[in-house]
Amino acid sequence: MTAMQHVPCALCDSPTAVPWFTGRDRGLGHPGRFFVVRCQRCGLARQSPRPLDLAPYYEGGYPQYTSDLYTWRPWWRRGVPDAVEYSGSGGIQWKLIRRMVPWRSGRILDIGCGNGDLLTILDRAGWEVHGYEPHAPTAMAADHRLCHLGRTVVHSDAAILDAWPAQSFDVITLWHVIEHLPEPLAMMRTVRRLLRPGGLCLIQTPHVAAAEALLLRSYWHGWELPRHLWFFSHTTLQALLERAGLTVWARPVSNSYDIAVLSLGHVARAALGVSLGGRVVHLARSGPVQALARAGFLVLDHAGLGSQLTVVAVRPLDHPAHPGAAPRA
Ligand SMILES: [Zn+2]
């Protein structure tokens, strides 16, 4: 049996919590029961107890991020080389960066950069790109895509985060990363150190107060047990960022349809079996259904009930007497 450890709250250090529910690994199907609790003092939800060694639970890959889920495109755009990158998750992130970051170039670090989709797009757009990806084979593949730059772009050794000098970056992004980190507060303090004053950090993570989470209970994909360790609301994420010395500057809306498809997959596979469940998911991804569903989810997202929490945080200026250098809303 896997050794489990009780963990205190990452936000207020309190060890006390009330049980929320028990779930299982619906993403990769590893055996075992996993426990979600809510901090009695500050309300941050966490997995506790959790497996002492999480590495085995990542074995078998992370298929939802390498499948065609994020790379679906209409037939008239298939075969266009750039379509994959610009319609995939990297493309969605790039659009958010263009919308929220007031600069058109600079030094950017993508923490948990995966296969380097976003870095490739940013490189073409004129940014000086850097990546950190702890999964070594994925990091190597991503680095190879950017080998024309003639330097190591994507690092897989966590020591690099301490090796970079303070204030190295204008922008740092963490897309669906913070919920995986055993020590999210320590990472956000590192992010603060690495950002220049006035620099921006973009974070995206599942939204624990989403309608889908309440409706689908343990089938909601945002739980992603046991790989997700923390489950944030706007309030708890803001409190964590503030404790790390960052200020929430904006909360852009991002469509949560893609998470809904993953949740639907969990429900459909449990109710109809793998084969029929797969067909339901395939239908949900088809062009007309997806177009309609995305519009519906946009309404949900604007009402603050969507499954994605997106936050832009700023490292406050050291000398607030000169606000001219600060980004403006
Ligand atoms: Zn707490």
Image (tube, rainbow, N blue to C red):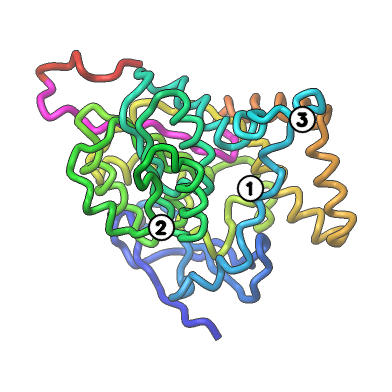
Quarter of the image that includes the C terminus: top left
Disc 1 from disc 3: Cα separation:
37 Å
Q: Is residue 272 above or below residue 241?
A: below
Q: The disc labelled 2 sits on which kind of residue?
A: Leu
- Residue 192 pos. (x, y %): 24, 41
As for residue 310 lying within the magenta part, the answer is yes
Foreground disc of the pair 2, 1:
2
The part of the chain drawn in magenta is: 305-320
Q: Which residue is mark 1?
A: 214
Foreground disc of the pair 3, 2:
3
Which of the pair 151/303 is nearer the observer?
A: 151
**Of callouts 3 and 2, which one flags the residue occurring earlier in the amino acid sequence?**
3
Q: Residue furthest top?
A: 324
Quadrant in the rendering for residue 236: top left
As for residue 235 lying within the magenta part, the answer is no
**Of callouts 2 and 1, which one flags the residue occurring earlier in the amino acid sequence?**
2
At x 48%, y 64%, the residue is 47
- Residue 113 pos. (x, y %): 46, 46
Q: Residues within 10 Å of mark 1 (few under 14, many from 20)?
A: few
Q: The disc labelled 3 sits on which kind of residue?
A: Arg
Q: Which residue is mark 2?
A: 181
